[in-house]
Image (cartoon, rainbow, N blue to C red):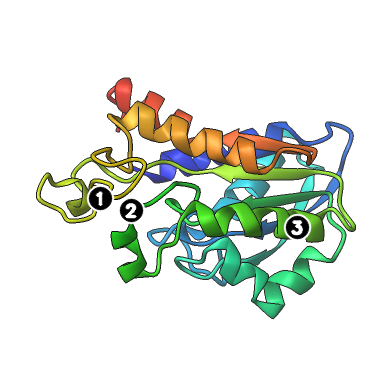
Amino acid sequence: MRFKTQLLAAAVLVFSMNAEAKDVSMLFIGNSHTYIPAMGTSEDPAVPKMIAALAKSIDPNLNVTFANSTPGGYRLEQHYNNATSVELLKKRYDKVVIQANSIEPLDLPPYFLTTDDVGVTSFSVFLPKLLDLAFQQNTDVTLYVTWGWNAKHTYFEASHPGLYFPSDSPKAGQRWCGVDKYDYQNMLNESWALHSQGYNTKLALVGNAWLQLQDAGVV
């Protein structure tokens, strides 16, 4: 059912296009949240194809073409160090969409270092770096803000060693994911907004749409 959220993401991006445009070129930088494992691959991502189909449904003459770099699990730092991602970002498009690893915008307990997830300490550095590359040739950049992990994820179990910040942390005793799913999503949204300050970007708050679907009992 998660593909429905991706469809909402596609709608957000399509309807923010210039209504006068007929040929629209897009670049997608991201990972499996963009290609959707059940529906596409990193080489043949699903969300861009959804957007192209939605564009055609709005106007049969509207033609969306896209390029992408969407390896599974990729963080922004990995994209910055990936020659393909960098070369694509240096080119000119009508719209650029950037999507990160789902937890990297957050401050994470030291436990996550064991899984190579450094969180916001990396995100805060490499989001601006990628935006600097994108804005060399582009003026329309959208940040695709994803959703939090499922509440049944093993990392949310009370006994999990990485759930809370340790006693020597300024956040000692706090959960890295907030008090509930709404707090968790707000933390993601706020981090994207904070670390893109100074850039003329748009935020596609797809995680909010996912929460609304959950609350409505649709998923």
Q: Can residue 34 be seen in this view?
A: no
Near mark 3 (Cα within 10 A), the count class, few <14, some 14-19 or many ≥20, is some
Residue 166: which disc?
Answer: 1
- At mark 2, the secondary structure is loop
Is residue 118 toward the left or the right of residue 142 in the image?
left
> Residue 210 placed where, x, y %?
41, 33
Q: Which residue corresponds to mark 2? A: 109
- Is 180 above or below relative to 56? above
Frontmost of labels 3 and 2 is: 2
Is residue 50 toward the left or the right of residue 18 in the image?
left
Frontmost of labels 1 and 2 is: 1
> Residue 193 placed where, x, y %?
62, 35
Q: Which residue corresponds to mark 3? A: 65
Determine the residue positioned at 51% across, 40% down.
7
**CB atoms of marks 1 and 3 within 8 Å:** no
**CB atoms of marks 1 and 2 within 8 Å:** yes
- Is 95 above or below relative to 76? above
Q: In the image, what residue type sits under mark 2?
A: Pro
Q: In the image, what residue type sits under mark 3?
A: Thr
Residue sitting nearer the eye, 6 or 151: 151
Earlier sequence position, callout 1 versus callout 3? 3
Residue sitting nearer the eye, 115 or 98: 115
Determine the residue positioned at 57% across, 71% down.
78
